[in-house]
Amino acid sequence: MQIHKYDTVIVGAGGAGMRAAIEATKRSRTAVLTKLYPTRSHTGAAQGGMAAALANVEDDNWEWHTFDTIKGGDYLVDQDAAEILAKEAIDAVLDLEKMGLPFNRTPEGRIDQRRFGGHSRNHGEAPVRRACYAADRTGHMILQTLYQNCVKEGVEFFNEFYVLDQILVEEDGVKKSAGVVAYELATGEIHVFQAKAVVYASGGTGKFFKVTSNAHTLTGDGQAAVYRRGLPLEDMEFFQFHPTGIWRMGILLTEGARGEGGILRNKDGERFMEKYAPVMKDLASRDVVSRAIYTEIREGRGCGPEGDHVYLDLTHLPPEQLDAKLPDITEFARTYLGIEPYTDPIPIQPTAHYAMGGIPTNVEGEVLSDNTTVVPGLYAAGEVACVSVHGANRLGTNSLLDINVFGRRAGIAAAEYSADHDYAELPEAPAQFVVDQVERLRASTGNERVAQLRKELQETMDANVMVFRTEQTIKTAVEKIGELRARYRNVSVQDKGKRFNTDLLEAIELGNLLDLAEVMAVSALARKESRGGHYREDYPNRDDVNFMRHTMAYREVGADGAESIRLDYKPVVQTRYQPMERKY
Amino acid sequence: MSTATLDKVEAEAQASPYITVTFRIRRFNPEISDEATWQDFELEIDPKERVLDGLHKIKWDMDGTLTFRRSCAHGICGSDAMRINGRNRLACKTLIKDINPDKPITVEPIKGLTVLKDLVVDMDPFFQAYRDVMPFLITKGNEPTRERLQSAEDRARFDDTTKCILCAACTSSCPVFWNDGQYFGPAAIVNAHRFIFDSRDEGGEQRLEVLNDKDGVWRCRTTFNCTDACPRGIEVTKAIQEVKRALITRRF
């Protein structure tokens, strides 16, 4: 076991982690621990754009953007945080441009902007062009640009290091972060990173669903690490289903396709979104569009022999426009479906896309141990975190924005904390939990297989806690997850080696997914209302009297070692916007 | 709404005709043996699935020790470049039906980088070459308050090379790189091109000096392997030629 000492340690090298690293490296001795080479991170899969009210192509301002974000999140958004997001968006985009990001340009040479779901002029009057973009590979360009600037700043990376545990210590009755424990993929060696400040930026948890736009590696490792140590997770029941995933595969086709004029059609060729969202139509918020698609499918208007999908129709758009603005997604349709989008509509279905919930933080990125108490030295940003700027449903282009605004804030705050504080003392045997976990899995002779359990988990999640939920379906999921968690204790791996043991890591990742799936389902069961991405058929209306509040889920361990989940609630921060009925 | 092509695609998906294929995989694990060997796996697969799906079936259902890198599974993250039937491709962008599944499908690690285990190679020299070309915007003077202006035409000059996902398919298909690991390789030159031809950048001269080195662009023998290998469709050889021309004319 090796012990390293850094002022600041950042966990994850996607957009949020690298944006934080650029700031932290300038101010403190910083290490970035990442399970993937930085440019492999899933930020690179984001396509459509990054919202900012630059007003380069039409009237716009940050107040409209703030309103849209809050309305999009079905009023579960913390309004102070949304205001920061929308205000700082403008500098965040300009900063990226100065770092070299090749945005598409207007005829005047300024950053071009396009329409995106839920972004409107003057509080819902009409769609507005707010998304700054680089073709349909905006996330790729952000990831590349941030990595390039990390190279420029000399950021120190530990590639293929999996952080498996958060070290928390208690000093004078205060829970503090003392560092993290990581597993080095190449050698199987365990490393302790003692740090004054730790920033989690390890991304989402989408792999507990079967049809998902998420990478294989998005297994909620950061959320699981802090949750296991008794810190809460916020609003985990809110998961976004992106309307347009490639049928059966779930590969993302950007909302920018509809921003460019693409239309959703059912088997009769009808533009069905007109019925559900008369003003914004195909550009209503994602939760609204995904529910509309499944309503069409359930009522027998789905396409194909099984009527299990609808079409994204781009055939009326000029091929030159598709080539210039949507080259990647049209290529996905050709590669994976054998379809020519110039002439054929693309079969799509909603795909599990984004976790609105996560590790609760305040607007400085500081992690909370309850509704108000900060954990000194612990930070989180990006999809792993819940600030909450996305509330019950995130608007498209607000995630690339989130990682830049709050990645930067967390990086600065962590480095400033490092400068002013000393190391918290490491506990005795700081790596013991990970050592035991790894040894147990390597030595296990149990008869359960990782792939089988993961498949059953993904199937139950797709069937029971997706776009439509009821008490009964959620209970089915909770029960099934309980069974899978019990069987997980008998899981074994075939690869017993030290070197690049991805078999072992997949087993650990499955453990994380199981923990988080349970939190999600239990949180969803308790929320007896429908709001944003959480839709309960048995409680189809939003209930502001009882549920205008964030869910806080804590892991409890009884005296007998039995685990349970305790739910608590946190008030929503409201500043200037009163909840209204949401219409698009 | 449906069309002839679409009906065919949907009906085919319906039929899901599983076929039996053989994956012939180059295995290497220095914890067990210093020798690399070929191993065959027979599996049932839908020909519309990806080579990556086949590798997952093997890893998840047959042999958990099979080791490879992957993440996004749709050609964006650049993790799973490998040599499939003798050609560099991304496993997640190669469909079984497109590579003649009647014969065994050979899968090997990409060439020219040290193999660490099975299909996993040491990527550090590859990323070092990338870092050596200073792959970041270099500017002088004061920063503007708003964005730097750039015309759509100027933006188009380097559009192609911004697509690079650093998968190393090009560099590890290059015969010059196989013979001499000191050569920067196509990917590093592509990323230098991305900045040299960016109208906002003022570091072109510095980068050209780096590439004028004995291990720089002049080693390129224009075999077009890199262009053929690029899963993003970048015209790699053309980009290298443009850099060579810029070195001669000092105009870019």
Image (cartoon, rainbow, N blue to C red):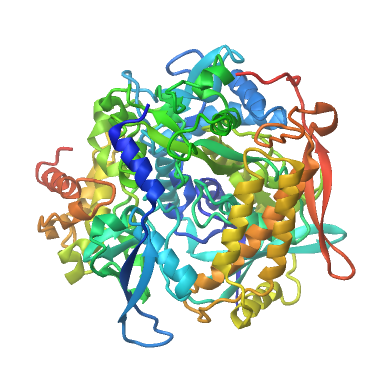
Measured as percent of width and height from the top left, residue A361 is found at 71, 44
Front residue (pair A200, B50): B50
Task: State left or right for residue A345 relative to residue A443.
Answer: left
Give the position of the C terminus of chain A as an image quadrant.
top right
Task: State left or right for residue A234 relative to residue A395.
Answer: right
Residue B102 can be seen, yes or no: yes
Measured as percent of width and height from the top left, residue A113 is found at 43, 23
Measured as percent of width and height from the top left, residue A89 is found at 55, 30
Say which residue appears at 46% left-offset and 76% top-offset. B65
Above or below, A91 relative to A563: above
Task: State left or right for residue A287 relative to residue A155.
Answer: right
Among the 4 quarters of the image, the one containing residue A434: bottom right
Say which residue appears at 45% left-offset and 70% top-offset. B59
| Residue that sits furthest to the bottom in the current view | B33
Residue A185 can be seen, yes or no: no
Measured as percent of width and height from the top left, residue B77 is found at 40, 52
Give the position of the N terminus of chain A as an image quadrant.
bottom right
Count of residue discs: 0
Above or below, A496 relative to B79: below
